[in-house]
Amino acid sequence: MSRYQPPKIASSEITPQGLYLNRRGLMGLAAGGIAAAAAPGAFAAALTATPSAYKVDAKLTSKEDVTTYNNFYEFGTGKEDPSRNAGSLNTRPWTIEVGGLVAKPQVIDIETIMRDYTMEERVYRMRCVEAWSMVIPWIGFPISALLDKVEPLGSAKYVAFETLVRPEEMQGQAGIFQALDWPYVEGLRLDEARHPLAILATGLYGETLPNQNGAPIRLVVPWKYGFKGIKSIVKITLTEQEPPSTWNRLQASEYGFYANVNPAVDHPRWSQATERRIGEADGLFGGARVDTLPFNGYADEVASLYAGMDLTKFY
Ligand code: MTE
């Protein structure tokens, strides 16, 4: 994010007003797995109905924008590179190695996850550190469900996540110019990872996760800046020490480990007080601007995780 220009919005990225959420379709999908199985590419696993706590009183970002305006440097640094280039990624077979400070380390097959974990639809506000935002209907399950399976030891304090390295299928990892050090890595404190809002997503908009959004499984932590949402995860490790995170390692003065959305702490090169909702009606300065909320609007749920911490220091 320190290596490219702030995004300019193209007219092709404006959401047609008519796309304002097909809620009925989604809810129908949530209510019955049969409808899901019938629609092409639709989510096959059983979905539970959306709990009201995971709804957002805002317009959904169009599926078109959610799946064509992405950050996924393994496929290039441009916003449209992931949707153009991620088709080359094979997401089957796929396993996730879960280990470190746990009683029951496991290599879990993605098919097992799709079959055994109860998927829920969660509509989350998502806030990128680049001061734009989206509202996305994810499908996933709480990370805590997976952590329970491996039984973290008392000494485990953090959860480290790692993305696939496969230059043959990820063109951003091949060649001379490498935007980042691979693998892309991220981390959470264990209590953050256990918070019910923090999920591993396997789908969006009622369908299996598109490759550009992090198939087959990625992290979604709605009260943190988007870069924490590591994609295409192959490894999860419980640790005692704070694990490295890609953007923090690259530029610690700009990207902290915590990365909680905080309108009061500016990025060194821009304000975080407001955000541009991708796809909403163009304003004078290109895109509707809305105020950024502490913890991205989830303060009631998560602020207690950070009681007593100086959030200007632990940004
Ligand atoms: N995960 C990997 N492996 N590689 C990346 O480059 N980019 C991050 C995050 N996860 C990234 C990643 C950033 S900067 C953002 S804003 C979000 O993914 C974007 O997620 P989206 O494209 O699904 O909206």
Image (cartoon, rainbow, N blue to C red):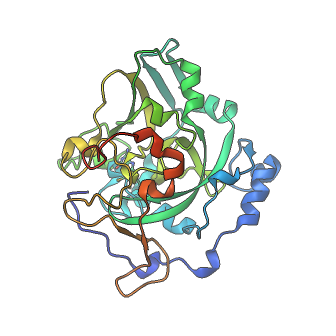
Of residue 213 and residue 277, the one placed in the foreground of this image is: 277
- Give how far across and how far down residue 15 sits, in percent: 53, 76
Q: Is residue 193 left or right of residue 269?
A: right
- Give how far across and how far down residue 193 sits, in percent: 48, 35
Which residue is rendered at x = 37% and y = 81% of the image?
Answer: 286
Which residue is rendered at x = 42% and y = 57% of the image?
Answer: 294
Of residue 219 and residue 306, the one placed in the foreground of this image is: 306
Up-down: is 159 above or below 261?
A: above
Quadrant in the picture for residue 46: top right
Q: Is residue 265 left or right of residue 282?
A: left
Up-down: is 241 above or below 121?
A: above
Q: Residue furthest bottom?
A: 284
Quadrant that contains the N terminus: bottom left
The answer to whether residue 94 is visible is yes
Which residue is rendered at x = 32% and y = 64% of the image?
Answer: 272
Q: Residue furthest top?
A: 103
The answer to whether residue 109 is visible is no
Of residue 41 and residue 34, the one placed in the foreground of this image is: 34
Of residue 231 and residue 244, the one placed in the foreground of this image is: 244
- Give how far across and how far down residue 159 sits, in percent: 41, 29
- Give how far across and how far down residue 303 sits, in percent: 46, 46
Which residue is rendered at x = 44% and y = 48% of the image?
Answer: 88
Up-down: is 15 above or below 24?
A: below
Quadrant in the picture for residue 305: top left
Quadrant in the picture for residue 187: top left
Q: Is residue 71 left or right of residue 209?
A: left
Report how many numbered discs are placed on residues in the image: 0
